[in-house]
Image (spheres, rainbow, N blue to C red):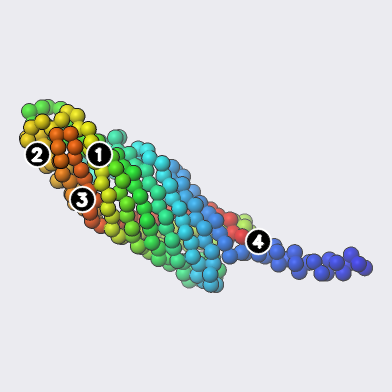
Amino acid sequence: MKKILLLIFIFPLLTNAQLKLLGGKNVIKTNLSGLLINNYNITYERSILKKMSLSVGFRYMPKTTVPLKSTLEKYLDNPDIKINDFEMGNMAITPELRLYLSAGKLKGFYIAPYVRYASFDLTVPVTYDRPGFTTKPTVLFNGKITSLSGGLLLGMQYNIAKKLVLDFWLIGAHYGTSNGDIDATNINPALNSQADRDALQAQLNEFNEFGPFKFESKVTSATTANIKSVGAWAGVRALGLSLGVRF
């Protein structure tokens, strides 16, 4: 009889504990699609109302050759940019507010306004026509550019296998400002003549406007040059697939 009374007493407690574990207010997840391009992400999301949550995501990609080279080459369509020498690393922090429009707490279709701070570590090769020579020298620029953007993401999130969460980014985009410098500090061969400097400057000027991005470029000496990011910044979030644990 004592055992039966004990079970009657603890059964509601066990049930409540299980419900909290399987349907809690928190989700920790990672973006599986980003792993394909060495882009590592972790996001913590917490429900604050039945159909509203706050989250913060951290993304990191070690500096390496740029992914999707063939696609980027077709987009740039410029033989003076050597994609194989282009390197990029980045990190980003993304606070996000989610508004779920259908199924309820932490699940269903959502609209998510967000803010993103990002930092990009870049190596950019620039090839130019040197007067009087048949070969084209390449100048390597190295440096960092930071950006601050705001945007909107549409997606769907669902519970699978009880404790697991699947988050699918449908489409999103952000727009903001940027600043930073990438510098060439040891140009070889040196730009010993004004004609050499003018040739490199003319090539740099071609990149001062690139889509929504704007730069100011200047040859500063026989062995140095600078590219400064001074304008807008834009990015896209699309077709991302994240897997997480809800607790």
Q: Closer to the camera, 228 or 34?
A: 228
Above or below residue 163? Residue 39 is above
- Element class at badge 4: helix
Q: Position of residue 185 (x, y in %)?
A: 23, 36
Question: Label 2, label 1: how many angstroms apart (C-alpha)?
Answer: 17 Å
**Is there a contact, CB below 8 Å, between mark 4 and mark 3?**
no
Q: Residues within 10 Å of mark 4 (few under 14, many from 20)?
A: some
Residue 127 can be seen in this image: no
Question: Label 3, label 2: how many angstroms apart (C-alpha)?
Answer: 18 Å
Q: Residue at x 22, y 33 (%)?
A: 186
Question: Label 2, label 4: how many angstroms apart (C-alpha)?
Answer: 66 Å
- Element class at badge 3: strand
Disc assigned to residue 198: 2
Upstream in sequence: badge 4 or badge 1: 4
Q: Which residue is mark 1?
A: 141
Q: Amino acid at mark 2?
A: Asp
Q: Position of residue 47 (x, y in %)?
A: 54, 67
Q: Which residue is mark 3?
A: 215
Upstream in sequence: badge 2 or badge 1: 1
Q: Quadrant of residue 88?
A: top left
**Is there a contact, CB below 8 Å, between mark 3 and mark 1?**
no
Q: Which residue is mark 4?
A: 21
Residue 76 can be seen in this image: yes
Upstream in sequence: badge 2 or badge 4: 4
Q: Amino acid at mark 4?
A: Leu
Horizontal arrangement in the rendering, residue 59 relative to residue 45 (left or right): left
Q: Residues within 10 Å of mark 3 (few under 14, many from 20)?
A: many
Q: Amino acid at mark 1?
A: Phe
Upstream in sequence: badge 3 or badge 2: 2
Q: Position of residue 176 (x, y in %)?
A: 30, 60
